Image (tube, grey):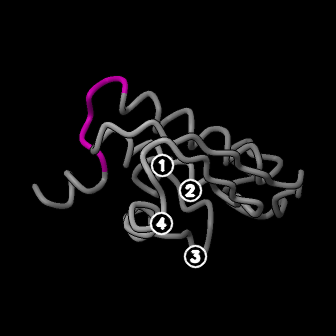
Amino acid sequence: LRKLMGLDLFDNPKDPELLKRWISYVTDQNDLILDFFAGSGTTGQAVMELNAEDGGNRRFILVQIPEATDPASEAHKAGYKKISDITVERCRRVAENIAAGEATSAKRAKTA
């Protein structure tokens, strides 16, 4: 998350690699994934990257209440007034990276 967003926006972000593994185990390539507590959008990132890696057409729905970020946090200072603002921006950046042909997190890890 830090590499993608440039800041420490969450204390304990989920690992997209772990979520990709779980999603690949329990879904087919055309399934719909629902994350009712989206937080920073890790599930969205995992689904988009997994689709890019295996040619899948999984879709996702992320739900995040408009919970305010802490005014003293780096996220708030960077202009993310709600957690859902981070969710949307993260998904936008991941989609742009995939469209630009940049390596997904798994491929980056293998080449690092």
Mark carried by residue 43: 2
In the image shown, does 58 or 7 lie closer to the viewer?
58
Q: Which residue occupies the extreme bottom position in the image?
A: 12
Are there few (<14), some (14-19), or many (20+) residues within 10 Å of tag 3?
Answer: few
Q: Which is more N-terminal, label 4 or label 2?
A: 4
Question: Which residue is labeled 1 in the image?
Answer: 47
Label 4 belongs to which residue? Answer: 26
Q: Identify the secondary structure beneath mark 3.
A: loop
How many other residues sit within 10 Å of disc 2, few (<14), some (14-19) or many (≥20)?
A: many
Question: Where residue 47 appears, x then y in whole percent?
Answer: 48, 49
Observer-nearest of 86 and 17: 17
SS at circle 4: helix
The Cα atoms of the two marked residues, 4 and 1, are separated by 12 Å
- Kind of residue sitting beneath label 4: Val
Q: Nearer the viewer, mark 3 or mark 1?
A: 1
Task: Name the residue carrying label 3.
Answer: 12
Task: From the viewer's side, name the closer residue of 11 and 98.
Answer: 98
Residue 99 in the image: state x and y as whole percent: 37, 24
Q: Amino acid at mark 3?
A: Asn
The disc placed on residue 98 is none
Residue at image point 46% right, 57% down: 2
Side of 81 where 56 appears, left or right: left
What is the magenta range?
Answer: 99-104
Q: Nearer the viewer, mark 4 or mark 3?
A: 4
Furthest residue in direction top, as rendered: 100
Q: Is residue 10 left or right of residue 46?
A: right
What residue do we see at 74% from left, 41% from top? Answer: 79
Q: Earlier in the sequence, mark 4 or mark 3?
A: 3
Marks 3 and 1 close (CB-CB < 8 Å): no
Q: Type of residue at label 1?
A: Val
Depth-wise, is mark 2 or mark 4 nearer the camera? 4
